[in-house]
Image: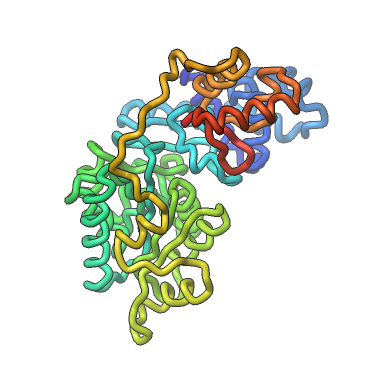
Amino acid sequence: MNDEEIIASIALTLTPTLGLKIRKRLIDRLESASTILSSKTTLKTLLPGIKEDLITSLFSKERKNRALEEYQFALNHNIQCITYTDKRYPYRLKECIDAPLVLYFRGNCDFNVPYVVSMVGTRKATQYGKKLCHDFINDLHLSIPDALIISGLAFGIDIASHKAAIEFNHPTVGVLAHGLDRIYPNQHKNIAEQMYNKGGIITEFPIHTEPERYNFVSRNRIIAGMSDATIVVESANKGGALITADLANDYNRDCFAFPGRTTDQYSEGCNKIIRQNKAALITSAEDFVKAMQWNCFNKKKSPIQRSLFPDLTPQEKEIALLLQKQGSMQFDNILLKTKIPLTQLHTLLFTLEMKGVIRILTGDRYELI
């Protein structure tokens, strides 16, 4: 990813009059942020009817300088700016309609590993909740040692999950509700530093962003969106963990919860979402793995020889190479790039899926396995 594209992507996120859905629509249509900001004339030609005040905001010197400041800070502090079109971008999150255009990440982690789990819960975790985190991740390690553990670096269940992941050598990522010019809460700075070698911290927010209450609600969608499944460990009747569970359901992701006694305040939320069928009941990592049908985790999969793609027809190979280069793509974009007739493309994609070369994601997207 070149510097120009990163800076242009940051500039788009810093344009308050440009909503997230419009930003992504522009990226999908014009294929890059730098194309959008290449010139006013080009933008007017590509998007007839665009409002003049929006163009003024997009091309303002202040906006460009602010984007440059953000990018320079990232370079100076070993922060990766991962744009929506970057191959490193979490593909699970990319499937979500409200995925951010840019993610700022400090650490060392592959977000696109086969198994990703979010663990969330109350900031006032009990010893029961902390022990659940510890025992769950310990048992998960015996089954799926490379599973990525996502949480929010907050007090309570979040930090208990990160600590357990570090203890059992799982990669773990904390999703923050502010810029990477700080760690909040400050008491968890040492834990964050331990996460950098195998995991790290990530946010959609630029520097100088305060950890305001509403930002935590926004960051919860990233916790849910980056994961195959969200597990609520402990929660009162109301709280951020239940919001994350609702988001996981909205994204059509699996959601689980540990039950508790009916008299326990911080099990009320878990018992409620289990009762409402918003979360499946689990009591152990074994329950979770079976429910997710991850039972064959110890069997090593034979990787497809992507450089050669044997036994594929020329058109099948063309599609495979395109997905290798671009990452996951929507059907319409594959159609546009390959110029293969619509009906024939449907048949080719189905055949590639049956051959185990590609898989279909939500939102009519396809990717190589």
Q: Residue furthest bottom?
A: 263
Residue in front for this viewpoint, 273 or 29? 273
Residue 15 in the image, given as x and y percentages of width and height: 60, 37
Residue at left offset 57%, top offset 37%: 360
Q: Residue furthest right?
A: 49
Can residue 275 be seen? yes
Number of numbered markers: 0
Is 169 placed left or right of 37 in the picture? left
Residue at left offset 45%, top offset 40%: 206
Residue 31 in the image, given as x and y percentages of width and height: 62, 24
Residue in front for this viewpoint, 14 or 354? 354
Residue 237 in the image, given as x and y percentages of width and height: 45, 77
Residue at left offset 37%, top offset 76%: 267
Residue in front for this viewpoint, 270 or 314? 314
Can residue 182 be seen? no
Give the vertical position of 241 relative to 127 (above or below).
Answer: above
Rendering colour mode: rainbow
Is 133 placed left or right of 12 in the picture? left
Q: Residue furthest left?
A: 167
Is 236 placed left or right of 141 in the picture? right
Q: Quadrant of residue 316?
A: top right
Residue 227 in the image, given as x and y percentages of width and height: 43, 48
Residue in front for this viewpoint, 248 or 153? 248
Residue at left offset 53%, top offset 74%: 276
